[in-house]
Amino acid sequence: MELPGLAFAVWMFICFCASVDGYPNGKIREACTSMIPCHGSSPQPSPEHTITVNGTEFKPGDSIEVHLSGPDFEGFFIQARDAEHLDSPAVGSFMLVDRRLSQLLTCGRTKNSAVSHTSKAKKKYIKVYWIAPADAPKRVQFLATVVKKYKTFWVKIPGPIVSQPNAPSPTPPLHTTSEALLTSHLVSYLSKPFNASGCGSMKFCVRNPSSCDPGSASCFFLSFQQEKSSVFIEMSGPSEGYLAFALSHDQWMGGDDAYLCINEDHRVHVRTACLKGRSPPVLDSENALEDVSWRLADGVLQCSFRRSIRLPAYKGRFNLDASYYIFLADGEASEGGLIYKHHRQPLITNGMYNVTGLPQDIGGSRSPRLIKAHGALMFVAWITTVSIGVIVARFFKPVWSHSFLFGKEVWFQVHRMLMLTTVMLTSISFVLPFIYRGGWSQQAGFHPYLGCTVMALTIFQPLMAGFRPSRHAPRRQLFNWFHWSTGTTTRILAVVTMFLGMDLPALDLPDPWDTYTMIGFVAWHVSIDVLLEIHSYCLVRKVEVIEDDRVQILQSLTSAEAEGRLFKQIVLTIYVCGNMVFLTAFLAAINQI
């Protein structure tokens, strides 16, 4: 006797719905326009909190210090808007001072255009920086929503108005570095973003996503243009801390020539460094870079500089007329210029390239090929083969019980073939991360532990099936329950493991698309399972038999099954097609990263 499919459906539903329950964390993008929290009560009339700034005038690219202070409050939401049109979208972007208390949000099309709390912990004071965009309105006003308690809050507390001066040009003055050891050259401000014109014809470019516009807030861009004995380099991307690229002889960090653009106190410093293993980069005390320029606007960091093709006097600088793998990374930096490990895999070119050779326009990948293969094989195994195999075993015994293939019933042969394929795919996929890492990964959280559990159960399940008692043996019912429970537990753990693995840095599928798509697959499988279970129940009711041993009864109801055979085959066809759609979506996402 098998456990009813409805119990499995409930089990799956509880496990996965429980994992997506929400909690207050300040990610309130729904309030971007109105700035009103959805707390089911009206705002208070007289605000107790104030907004202050450290200046009244700004020019594009300038940073303004913004303070929110007052009695204890739990939550807040800060924006800057056109003072003449306060209902218009947020303008400019913010930068954080204390990431424990505040976080950046994207409202509309402007990245980092709002700031909110990270938790309900009480606070009295918040400090952030607002960066004026290139297309800023003449007058900008800061607004804040403050939540003292869940039912006590103030909306759109008016703050100071800052305005642009009546200067003929909004371009900021030239800035010189304060670190004499780093460079003696002038550092200028870029008045406009980079563009991709000339990529592949006049300059060597690396872009992610492919063919993206370096002026957009989602484009990582790196270009090299040879000019006689030097190379002019441009680097751009969405970053609050730093952008960096490195030239490497292999696809592993260590012994590489690195260049970093670091946002330090809202000024960008361009540094050279050597990478030694997975340790933080060792910044050079001397700098061989010239014509350094930078720009910070709308959450995008851009910098450019020039260096000679050969620098024999500087240890650690590679010659630019040779071929290398190119790394492109971003991460966070503190106010003192201390950089932290990049929060996701760097973009790595798929081959070695000479940036002073034939101009090309290429992309790269943030996921190693072995990890991509690991994810792809797991998706094939646990979205297609195992799911279809379970459906066949549960609902197609009566349909295919009188058809034989190689001396065994067709349903059994199909089920066994799909399950053995699952074991094979899972086993191959299981070893790939160990080959890539060279051992156990300490950075992958619970994913490898659950993965090992799934692998052990996957091997145990067919071994147990090899010792199953005969159909009428006294222990056959115990075997059926044990076989079902082990298989169901393995499938649930496998899907949970995939949920965790999709967001790991080595794979990092698009978020939240990956989570919603996996939830969609679980719901799809459960719905088909429930549909077939209801159909089987209706067949039993139709012939008015007592369901003591439902499998044997259904096998004897040849006339009833004849009526239901076509329905089950249609549902199976639809189910297989649906699984292929989910699988194709995941494989396409893996191919694009």
Image (spheres, rainbow, N blue to C red):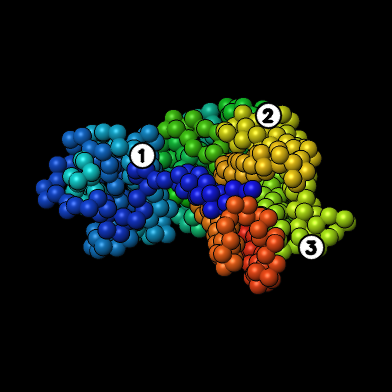
Q: Which residue bears the numbered disc 1?
A: 118
Q: Position of residue 88 (x, y in %)?
A: 29, 63
Task: Estimate the spatial distance between the alpha carbons at disc 1 and disc 3, rounded to whole Å.
Answer: 62 Å
Numbered circle sitting on residue 402? 3
Q: Is residue 164 visible?
A: no
Residue that appears at 55% across and 59% down: 530
What's the residue type where badge 1 is placed?
Thr
Residue that appears at 14% across and 49% down: 44
Q: Answer with left or right where residue 254 lies relative to residue 181.
A: right
Q: Which residue bears the numbered disc 2?
A: 440
Q: Position of residue 454 (x, y in %)?
A: 66, 38
N-terminal-most mark, 2 or 1: 1
Q: Could you classify mark 3 by the number of other residues whose Cα lies within 10 Å: few (under 14), some (14-19), or many (20 or more)?
A: few
N-terminal-most mark, 3 or 2: 3
Question: Cβ–Cβ below 8 Å for labels 3 and 2?
Answer: no
Q: Position of residue 70 (x, y in %)?
A: 18, 37
